Amino acid sequence: MEDLNVNGTLIWYYYICKREVWLMARNIVPDQDNINIDIGRFIHETSFQRKRKEISIGNVKVDLIDKKGEYLMIGEIKKTSKFVESSRMQLAYYLLELKRHGLKGKGVLTFPKERKREIIELNDELIEELEKVEKDILRICYESYPPKPVKINMCKNCAYNEFCWS
């Protein structure tokens, strides 16, 4: 396996399913016919069309970016707030990457279908947790085999369902 860069997607999945982290890192593509993937793409493509989208900063891609005074305001668009903790940590990771590149940032987590928004700001506690998570993600990804599947609520709608449970 080539050198791996942790990214926002791996951070997001880390808080939901460690097995998905391993699969994603190895470019094992989930079922592209999964309805939830289609819905997520649709929301991403149709929300905030006037704002700049998909800006790469280092090894991460942010959905929205806007200059607000001395800060860059970055945004992440999600289908649902069901996995809000994963979403918060993903956005916090983007803010950490901005900081590593010498930029100040704040984040806004957006759930268009629910008409919800949440502001995320990086702090020392988040930085410490994210640095530990980065190391654990790398440990998981460099294992020879994926973690054993663990049945969670997300499994029934997961695009890797057949891979784990067939």
Image: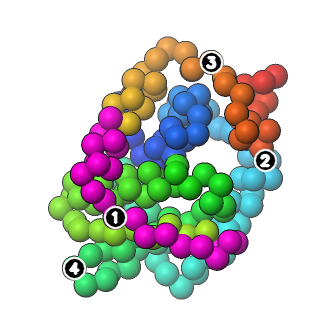
**Quarter occupied by the C terminus:** top right
The alpha-carbon separation of the residues under discs 2 and 3 comes to 22 Å
Mark 1–mark 4 CB contact (< 8 Å)? no
Residue 149, given in percent of the width and then of the height, sits at 66, 23
Q: Earlier in the sequence, mark 4 or mark 2?
A: 2
Image position of 109 (left or right of 43): left
Of circles 1 and 2, the one toward us is: 1
Residue 3, given in percent of the width and then of the height, sits at 35, 30
* SS state under label 2: loop
Q: Which residue has dot 3 on it?
A: 148
Q: Earlier in the sequence, mark 2 or mark 3?
A: 2
The alpha-carbon separation of the residues under discs 1 and 2 comes to 33 Å
Q: Which residue has dot 4 on it?
A: 70
Tag 4: amino acid: Glu
Of circles 4 and 2, the one toward us is: 4
Image position of 19 (left or right of 93): right
Which region of the structure is painted magenta?
112-132
The alpha-carbon separation of the residues under discs 4 and 3 comes to 45 Å
Vertical arrangement, residue 22 with respect to residue 159, above or below? above
Residue 30, given in percent of the width and then of the height, sits at 69, 39
* Residue 121: mark: 1
Image position of 79 (left or right of 51): right
Q: Residues within 10 Å of mark 2 (few under 14, many from 20)?
A: some
* SS state under label 1: loop
Give the residue displayed 59% in from the left and 28% down from the top. Answer: 19
**Quarter occupied by the N terminus:** top left
Q: Earlier in the sequence, mark 1 or mark 4?
A: 4
Q: Which residue has dot 2 on it?
A: 34
